[in-house]
Amino acid sequence: MATATATMPAPGTLLSPDATTQVRTRMLAIDALRGLVMLFMLVDHVRETFFLHVQVGDPMDPLNTPPELFFTRISSMVCAPVFVFLTGLSAWLYGQSHSRSEVSTFLLKRGLFLVFLELTLVNFAWNATFVPPTLWLQVIWAIGLSMIILAALIHMPRVALAVLGFVIVVGHNLLDGIVLTADSPFFEIWSILHQRSFIEITEYTRVRTTYPILPWIGVIALGYCAGPWFARHSDPSQRARRLVTWGVGLLVGFVLIRYLNVYGDKQWSSMDDGIRTLMSFMSLTKYPPSLLFLMPTIGVGLLFLAWFQQLEGRPVLKVLGLYGGAPMFFYVVHLLVLKALYLIAVQIWGLNQGSYYGFNNLSGIWLWAVLLSAALYFPTSWFAQLKQRRRDIAWLKYF
């Protein structure tokens, strides 16, 4: 979750007023996109906290999931792909005012920090205990490891890195048939790379590789390779054309490949009605993210990025930019707030979710997410502005 604010020109660099405006606009667009997907993520996490009593086993199951639950879940699809892509993009932008070795060192340190945070504070926020029976290796873990690997990959030529990222994203589904069991000597590493599994650590603790990282390595590499589109003196109109072209191309390509039903994800099928058929068509695999999961989500992200660059000066862009200016802070705080609210409700009413403190329809989930996002705006805004003011405090940039 590297923020774009770290990519501003080095102190002492002189820019013309027009150049300064361009830098500010492209950075704000990146932070605004990150902020938007943070809010979609909040909706999904409110759902996971206060709607479990009416959930189905898999909210992406087109046969057994109510359409309103299915499409609420699908609204969060863009979150992880956009985050990882923007992390790679921001790493390239950071390199505009830093050497490649400095970028590599930053990625390594930041990646290690995120892995540590996932194993400690983030898991505490999900489980309310520092030693849970299951450690969930989720999106922060995946971003952290991807940053660590990118720290080495950025020393490759850009073309070679782009080819590698493309091959991973497009080709990793060819590996879906490789399923290892716990007695295999490669089970643990394969579970981290491509197979969602439980790994037993002790008789009391296990880890769940919720986010196998191989596809995310491809996404972060492609994000890094897209960095020159946002170079300091790049043409904004050309950048917009590229974003729109690639965004539309990914969406059209997704529809065509998905319609052929031969590669890139599990097959879809015609259902009894049009809504269920659409749900089957859009039921995509996130763990690990399939080719067909990544194509529309990154495509939509690119289109939003192009649109946000046209909204210079609009209040909505500034508001979203503040959420996206402190992404790690918002992520940790919103998880802690949700867990605290849940535990307080349990202490008051016991484990009878739905009768008192759960929601019986998704409109309540969306309303509660709006209220929480408004409440969290103030601490997140404070922290984002603190990062801007106190760049002399090194640890702040990790949030």
Image (tube, grey):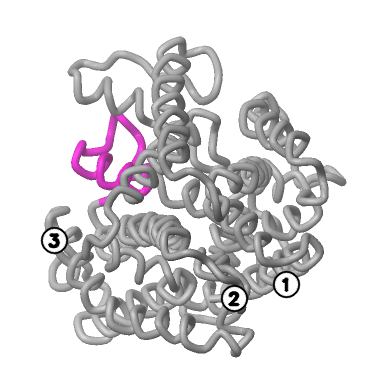
Q: CA distance from mark 2 to mark 3?
A: 34 Å
Contact check, label 1 and label 2, Cβ < 8 Å = yes
N-terminal label among 2 and 3: 3
The residue stretch that appears in magenta: 55-76
Residue located 65% across and 60% down the image: 96
Residue at image point 67% right, 54% down = 146
State left or right for residue 115 relative to residue 262. Answer: right
Q: Is residue 266 left or right of residue 53?
A: right
Residue indicated by mark 3? 364
Residue 337 figure quarter: bottom left
Q: CA distance from mark 1 to mark 3?
A: 40 Å
Q: Is residue 383 left or right of residue 356?
A: right
Quadrant in which the N terminus appears: bottom right
- The type of residue carrying mark 2 is Tyr
| Percent coordinates x, y for residue 30 in the rendering | 43, 56
Residue 398 got which mark? 2
- Residue 109 is tagged as 1
Observer able to see residue 34 = no
Residue 230 left/right relative to 269 = right
x, y percent for residue 86: 52, 53
Main secondary structure along the magenta-highlighted residues: loop
Give the Cα separation between the discs numbered 1 and 2. 9 Å
Q: Amino acid at mark 1?
A: Lys
Q: Which mark is residue 218?
A: none
